[in-house]
Image (cartoon, helix red, strand yellow):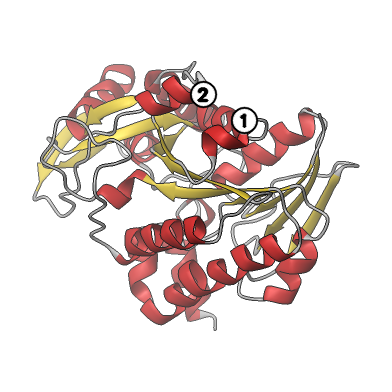
């Protein structure tokens, strides 16, 4: 059944792919975004685009008004960005999102899907992290992700269903492309520089193809509220070491590999069994598929490699222009 869906952060790397999928499925979509990285959504008779700052609560309320479902993707979306201006990060990733959740409930939104992250687990000395594993966020970004999870679950009630999506690191092509994510970055470095520099290599990261993550959000639209209310789900295609990803890219591109001192120690092998058991969810694409997809897009000239493809670089430009 078609629904009215508001995607907050609908102009981002994941949001652009998700919005297009929802439109293809017949839904009416409102995409709310700053569009800092450009507008890659195109036009559609069932698409309404609202340009704005998530801190502008009245504007966000107006965008969500009439929505059956809100998908909350918006945030300053990686650790380096979050660290540049901690107060601004708190305003966006914590304060504004708390107000948005309260507003969604007041407006009668039936379901809110929150994009958290497997990074909330931090460093874990266990074979696999499951959803009940205590969160150990190491960064400002992941700490606020964890706090919003807790806030959302405290606000749920009959008629207002909330679901937490702890997505793995995303890979694959999007019209609003990001080249600062592991698989995508290694593909870019291999083809444009001829060399991938690996920091350590033994760190374990859960990964997922962008289309598979979109599949999961689509599944949640119609999932039984009793099965998903207040639940968190790890969404991953599997766990890979940084070295394994580098080797995969090298085998496809014949690039060189070099090594450097480790600056990012995060390592958390996430278990996605719960999504399979509760919702019957299975990924359909491999991480190699994502790598090949990105490499082919680079070769075809579909990815320019300017600042809009690197969140931190573009954010610094915006900060300097204030």
Residue at horizontal 53 percent and vertical 55 percent from the top: 308
Number of numbered markers: 2
CA neighbours of label 2 inside 10 A, class few (<14), some (14 to 19), many (20+): some
**Which quarter shows the N terminus?**
top right
Residue farthest to the front, as pictured: 158
Q: Would you place residue 168 above or below residue 85 in this image?
A: above
SS at mark 2 in the image? helix
Q: Would you place residue 169 above or below residue 52 in this image?
A: above
Indicate the position of residue 72 as horizontal and vertical percent values. 59, 53
Indicate the position of residue 271 as horizontal and vertical percent values. 30, 29
CA neighbours of label 1 inside 10 A, class few (<14), some (14 to 19), many (20+): some
Query: Residue 279 — which label?
Result: 2
Residue at horizontal 64 percent and vertical 38 percent from the top: 18
Whether residue 77 appears in this view of the structure is no
In the image, 218: left or right of 78?
right
Residue at horizontal 48 percent and vertical 55 percent from the top: 153
In the image, 89: left or right of 182?
right
Residue at horizontal 44 percent and vertical 50 percent from the top: 116
Q: Would you place residue 42 above or below residue 191 in this image?
A: below
Circle 1 sits on which residue?
A: 223
Query: Residue 94 — which label?
Result: none
């Amino acid at each position: 059944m078609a629904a009215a869906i508001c995607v907050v952060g609908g102009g981002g790397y994941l949001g652009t792919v998700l919005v297009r999928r929802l439109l293809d499925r017949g839904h009416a979509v409102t995409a709310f975004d700053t569009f800092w990285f450009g507008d890659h959504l195109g036009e559609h008779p069932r698409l309404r685009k609202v340009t704005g700052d998530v801190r502008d609560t009245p504007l966000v309320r107006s965008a969500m008004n009439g929505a059956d479902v809100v998908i909350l993707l918006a945030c300053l979306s990686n650790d380096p960005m979050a660290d540049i201006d901690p107060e601004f990060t708190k305003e966006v990733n914590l304060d504004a999102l708390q107000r948005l959740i309260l507003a969604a409930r007041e407006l009668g939104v039936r379901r809110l899907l929150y994009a958290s992250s497997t990074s909330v687990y931090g460093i874990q000395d266990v074979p696999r992290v499951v959803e009940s594993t205590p969160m150990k966020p190491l960064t400002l970004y992941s700490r606020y992700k964890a706090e919003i999870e807790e806030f959302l679950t405290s606000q749920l009630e009959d008629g207002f269903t909330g679901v937490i999506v702890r997505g793995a690191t995303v890979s694959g092509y999007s019209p609003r492309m990001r080249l600062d994510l592991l698989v995508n970055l290694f593909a870019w470095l291999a083809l444009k520089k001829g060399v991938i520099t690996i920091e350590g290599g033994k760190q374990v990261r859960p990964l997922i193809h962008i289309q598979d993550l979109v599949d999961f959000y689509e599944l949640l639209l119609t999932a039984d509220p009793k099965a998903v209310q207040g639940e968190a789900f790890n969404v991953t295609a599997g766990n890979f070491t940084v070295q394994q990803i580098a080797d995969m890219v090298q085998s496809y591109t014949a690039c060189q590999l070099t090594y450097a001192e480790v600056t990012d120690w995060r390592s958390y092998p996430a278990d996605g069994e719960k999504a399979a058991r509760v919702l019957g969810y299975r990924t359909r694409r491999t991480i190699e598929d994502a790598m090949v997809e990105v490499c082919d897009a680079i070769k075809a000239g579909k990815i320019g490699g300017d600042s809009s493809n690197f969140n931190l670089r573009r954010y610094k430009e915006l900060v300097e222009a204030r």
